Amino acid sequence: MERYIPLSLNAQTAYAETFDMVLARTTARSVADLNGSFAKKQVKGATYWYFQFRDIDGRVRQIYIGPDNERVQKLITDGRAAPVAAADRLARSALALGCAGILPKHFAIIRRLAEYGFFKAGGVLIGTHAFISMGNMLGMSWRDGARTQDVDFAQAGKSISIGLPADIEVDIHAALDSLEMGFIPIQSFSGNAGATYLNPKEPELRIDFLAPANRSGDGAFNFDQLNIALQPLKFMEFSLENTTQAALLSRDGAVLINLPSPLRYGLHKLLVYGERTVAFRTKSAKDLLQSAALLSYSAANQPAELKEGLKDLLGRGPGWRKRAEQGISALLKIEPALEEFLRPAPAGRGVARKSKRPRPGCATAPRR
């Protein structure tokens, strides 16, 4: 089954122009009133750009600009700003030409967190909204797996190094309060605020804040730099490595976000499927559909990277391999064409070994 179709050239161009505009707009807002300089550093073999400045408390701070690529380099060289209205008009044009957008109420939440600095502080958009943005970024339209009422975010904290700054303090709880949409945090068993926000009048819409799990426990923990609680999730660190940037589109405008790598996110979904219980079968089905789309794209466009990503995932331990195998087995039932990429035949399979035994009736020379 075809999991995606290419967007038209006009749609891809409109998205690219929107991304350039929101990237320039976001950076201009960040550094307009600060004295500092651009700097870059290496994280796990990848290069990232930051704007570095000294805060009023004397501490050196860094604002994340983006991964080292032509767009970011041009932005740093030009130092150009872009008006807000222009980016929003471009977003509506991209949607009209076939790019995918999200619901206005979901966009309002994500944009407000962006305005409060969530993504500059290392925040990453995950879940179905990230999947939708990945399609636009890759120039594709997904056929399945793009509906949700959840808004999911992740933050690595200091548990792993992902190239995003984690030393900026922002108040995400205040950001959600400022929306006046009735969101309140669900209390945990300990009586503290949990990592999920709900509106009692609209319980189907929920906001979750996740983080990589660690050995200290599975319960939600307070993360002071964001003024919220984060819920640990096993294997999350895999999809938070090698993050990228994208423009999230809505009829109300566009906003710059951080995203997982589409390839790693597709592989991570296999782990999520293996970890879910039967009670979450509906979400498991969506995990498989999204993984099928992302990995089908990767197999067609970056097979070598898919091979390396799968090797990385399977090499992280028996628990990882067990859940990955469960996810792969389920995925191949709906997308058997991926078997050669997810279960490659061992080298030499199917080639008969030459026998060293003599044929009947043939004499052999004695060994010397």
Image (cartoon, helix red, strand yellow):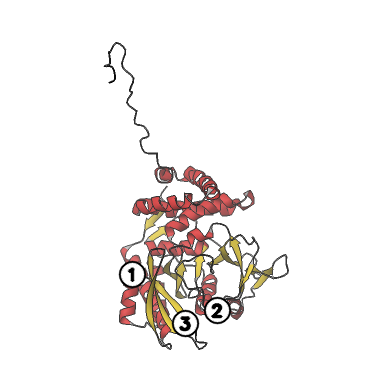
Residue type, numbered disc 1: Asn
Residue sitting at x 42%, y 61%:
135
Q: Is 219 situated above or below 28? A: above
User: Quick check: marks 1 and 3 in contact, CB under 8 Å?
Assistant: no
What residue sits right under mark 2 in the picture?
Answer: 170
Across and down, in percent, residue 132 comes to 46, 63
Q: Is residue 202 left or right of residue 111?
A: right
What residue sits right under mark 1 in the picture?
Answer: 69
Across and down, in percent, residue 24 comes to 38, 78
Q: Work out whether residue 241 can be spotted.
A: yes
The quadrant of the rendering that contains the C terminus is top left
In whole angstroms, how far apart are the C-alphas of marks 3 and 2?
16 Å
Would you call the spot at circle 3 few (<14 residues within 10 Å), some (14-19), or many (20 or more)?
A: few
Q: Is residue 101 left or right of residue 12?
A: right
Residue type, numbered disc 3: Val
Residue sitting at x 49%, y 42%:
333
Residue type, numbered disc 2: Val
Mark 1 vs mark 3: which is more N-terminal?
A: 3
Q: Nearer the viewer, residue 351 or 113?
A: 351
Residue sitting at x 51%, y 69%:
103
User: Quick check: marks 1 and 2 in contact, CB under 8 Å?
Assistant: no
What residue sits right under mark 3 in the picture?
Answer: 60
Most extreme residue toward the front is: 368
Q: Work out whether residue 290 can be spotted.
A: no
- Check disc 3 and report its element: helix, strand or loop: strand
Across and down, in percent, residue 257 comes to 46, 71
- Check disc 1 and report its element: helix, strand or loop: loop
Q: Is 140 situated above or below 368? A: below
- Check disc 2 and report its element: helix, strand or loop: loop
